[in-house]
Amino acid sequence: MADASAAAALLKREFPEAIVGTASIHGTPWLRVRTNQVPLVVHYLHTKPDLRGSLSLLWAVDHRPREARYEVLYLFALAERRDWLLLSTDLSDEARLFKSITPHIHAAQWYEREIRDMFGLIPQGHPDLRRLIRHEHWPKGTHPLKKDFPWDRTLGRQQGDYRFRHIEGEGVFEVPVGPIHAGIIEPGHFRFSVAGEPIMQLEVRHFWKHRGIEKLFEQQRLADAVPLAERVSGDTTIGHSLAYCQAVETLLRVDVPRRARYLRSLFLELERLHNHLGDVGAICNDTAYALAHAHCGRMKERIMQLNDRVTGSRFLRDTMTVGGVTRDITAQQRGEIVDVLDQIEKDFSELESIIFANASLTDRLETTGVLTERIAWDHGVIGVVGRASGIDQDVRRDRPFAAYDEIRPKVALYRYGDVRARLRVRMDEIHDSIRLIREIRLKLPDGPTAGEPGHEPRPGDWALSAVEGWRGEILYFIMAGEDGRIHRCKVRDPSFVNWPAIQWAVVGNIIPDFPLINKSFNLSYAGNDL
Amino acid sequence: MFRILKKSIKTGVVTGQHPAAQPAEGSTPEAREKARPFRRSLAVREVDTGSCNACEMEMNALANPIYDVERFGVHIAASPRHADALVVTGPVTFNMERALHDVYKQTPDPKIVIALGDCAVNCGVFKGSYGVTGPVDRHVPVDLRIPGCPPRPAEILKALEELRASRQSTEK
Ligand code: SF4
């Protein structure tokens, strides 16, 4: 088992030629690597048994106008302690090529295609260079995150068709679904190749909802962009706004008061609760068990009304601010929250026994949509989906933020990776969130609810932050620009990593089970498409 | 079985247990006229053109036992071809533009278009971005606007009710 600085030292010993500089930023070791040697170094980092670095984030920064260079950055989490290690490589303004690491690390595939679309930098050796975010009607040469691309440009249109992967043969046919679906859900396109009933292949084509969020961040000041972060994925209002605030607080060196930290945990757990309750109901509904859906919908609605009463928003909007929280929760309100949750826990436990007593329901859930631990690891799958496939990861425990250094979550872990396991993880987390909220009520310290900034960041300073939202790990990378503006903001919703994995979980299942499998993943389209 | 019945009896009827909505911004007389044929039954198709998903969640909430929108004769259609009204959310992204036009064409006349949420009404926080070509009324004619970010389910209900109310009850 190696910690990150030991791992950095090891890499430096092994690859003295490749590594051109080292530093440590906010406790994260940072190695600058020669562009040509990146694949070599990451392959070692990824496969060496005592390092087992998994790719957490891969993104690029255009440093213009300050410096005429691009930088590609690779954030790894070391397997055992999940310490962060950052690698980066510089590309000069004219050199638009960098070496793809996808042949070594599967999890890099979408990230590298994203960089190609958004920056026009080309990952050499990438096995799949089709467009990802810019659908085929986007004109050539439009790379929105380049600094010379105006944020409010009106795009023209060109002709073009996406080339799906085809399977050919007798009796094989394709079933296209979407982007507009039958239920009230977000747009996305799924293309199945089937022979008879079982699915042979699924190709997910997304990014219909691309609104240009990362570019919109660049038009804002560090202190002002919380409302935008709240709307990256509306169901994860707290998760995203908290991750954003934390990164900015690191940059501005704000000391967040303990009371504010506790309240942040409280809001985050409330958000987890109403979403998980909704998901449990929706999973049951997709097996046609409408009764459980109705009960869960009722409980979820109670929590949303509770949110509305204590914060003025059903989605807990406008509660986060840089430095702390915008509203305090009185002792009476805390009592009300715990009372409602006590009732809901009892209510929910009764429902759980009804659900698991129903053999025809559980039969649909078991062995459906299995995501094996191996595939989950290869794709760097995280969050609820990861924990249902044996990936033992939870930011609240691994890298405590808010008040999680004092109130410790129990991490729900299952190994089967089927729909039932994903349902179980959610059920366990519902109970655990209620327990955490009770603990917060008892331990909530007195004091102010927001801190003051102590520092003006220099242009080029950056910070990373991670939050365990209800879907999984949310990452923000924020680089400061001139006079308090944002130079670059990389947003990573857990959905972006988990979407490619669903393509593997459905293989061998039948199409009628797809909605069920999809619901058990319940990934965000908005947070994925940005 | 016994357990299920016991649970249902214990839970009782929860429909209508929600705070009342603020008075809705009135719909225009033309929109009310257009909504005349749908007073008793309205099939709604929801189209997401790039929302943050909160507006969708509130639309979904309408179907839960608390709001139970079906009791007002409103149901969610699975296809635009079965719909009387399109509820459009989101600021219309560059990638969803065509899908919106297609759906509009596929919905049989007469039809009502409802822009739900600030995004659909005026693009909200996404206004001006290269990826956004909305708001909705730049692409298709809009009959009713329900602002809010997101509007609460009770507010959506109220706006729908007001749109479909018969003249007598709106006048009193
Ligand atoms: S109006 Fe607000 S809640 Fe609705 S989709 Fe837009 S940002 Fe989300």
Image (cartoon, helix red, strand yellow):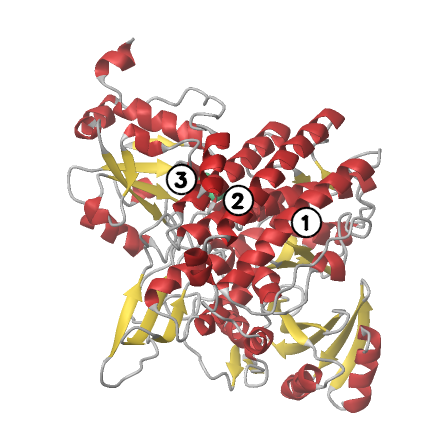
Residue at coordinates 78% horizontally, 90% vertically from top-left?
A14
Q: Is residue B156 left or right of residue A40?
A: left
Q: Which residue is mark 3?
A: B59
Q: Chain of mark 3?
A: B
Place of residue A185 in the rendered image (x, y in percent of width and height, measured from the top left): 39, 51
Q: CA distance from mark 2 to mark 3?
A: 24 Å
- Report whether mark 2 lies on the same chain as mark 3: no
Circle 3 packing at 10 Å, graded few (<14), some (14-19), many (20+), is many
Q: Looking at the image, which residue is at 77% across and 70% down? A: A81
Q: Quadrant of residue A73?
A: bottom right
Viewer-proximal residue, B33 or A139? B33
Which element type, helix, strand or loop, lies under badge 1?
A: helix
Can residue A48 be seen in this snapshot? yes
- Mark seen at residue A351: 2
Amino acid on which disc 2 is placed? Leu
Q: Is mark 1 within 8 Å of ligand 1?
A: no
Q: Chain of mark 2?
A: A
Q: How crowded is the residue under tag 1: few (<14 C-alpha within 10 Å), some, or many (20+)?
A: some
* Residue at the extreme top of the image, as rendered: B172
Left or right: residue A88 compared with residue A187 = right
| Quarter where residue A262 is shown | top right
